[in-house]
Amino acid sequence: MSQYTPEHEAQKRAIYEKMNPRRKKFVDRIGYDKWDPFAMPKDPIEIRKDPTNRTIQQLVSDFLRSREAHQGYTQAFASGAMELAMGVMRQEDRYEGMMEFSAWYKKLMEKEGVQNAD
């Protein structure tokens, strides 16, 4: 059963017929009935913002700039910050766990009077 008007169905068929074979193969794989050539495009990841209204790139840039004033950072450090920011922004459990553990560990170190090895 089609979700389109007869006019839209005719446009859909015309679009399909004009496609190159590789693209047709993709449509055939997902199923012609499931294929929606009129769907709105998805927003790119970088448009997603956190509650502070910053993108992942802005968050990581701000964080790394704050570190430069104190001691700088390595490429591995920056890469880890980017990975964690992306995971937290996507609300992936793995990264939420890392973030919560880090906060808990910092409090534990402060409570026990242990100096950070920075």
Image (cartoon, rainbow, N blue to C red):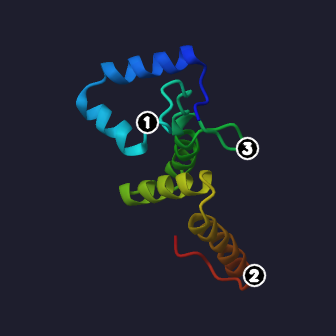
Mark 1 surroundings: few (<14), some (14-19) or many (≥20) residues within 10 A: some
**Cβ atoms under marks 2 and 1 closer than 8 Å:** no
Residues at discs 1 and 3 in contact (Cβ within 8 Å): no
Q: Residue 27 appears in which quarter of the rendering?
A: top left
Instruction: Say which label, 3 or 2, has the lower sequence index.
Output: 3
Residues packed near mark 2 inside 10 Å, few (<14), some (14 to 19) or many (20 plus): few
Residue placed under numbered mark 2 in the picture: 111
Assign a secondary structure to mark 2: helix
Question: Residue most toward the right?
Answer: 111
Q: Which residue is mark 3?
A: 51
**Is residue 71 positioned above or below 69 on the image?**
below
What kind of residue is marked 3? Answer: Pro
**Image quadrant assignment for residue 62:** top right
Image coordinates of residue 118 in percent, x first then y, are: 52, 70
Q: Which percent across, then down, holds residue 96?
A: 63, 65
Q: Residue furthest left?
A: 21
Residue 4 drawn above or below residue 95: above
Classify 10 Å Cα crowding around label 3: few (below 14), some (14-19), many (20 and above).
Answer: few
Front one among 81 and 18 = 18
Which residue does the numbered mark 1 point to in the structure image?
32
Which image quarter holds the N terminus?
Answer: top right
Mark 1 lies on a secondary structure that is loop
Label 3 sits on a secondary structure element that is loop
Three-letter residue code for mark 1: Tyr
- Judge by depth and name the residue closer to the eye, 89 or 77: 89
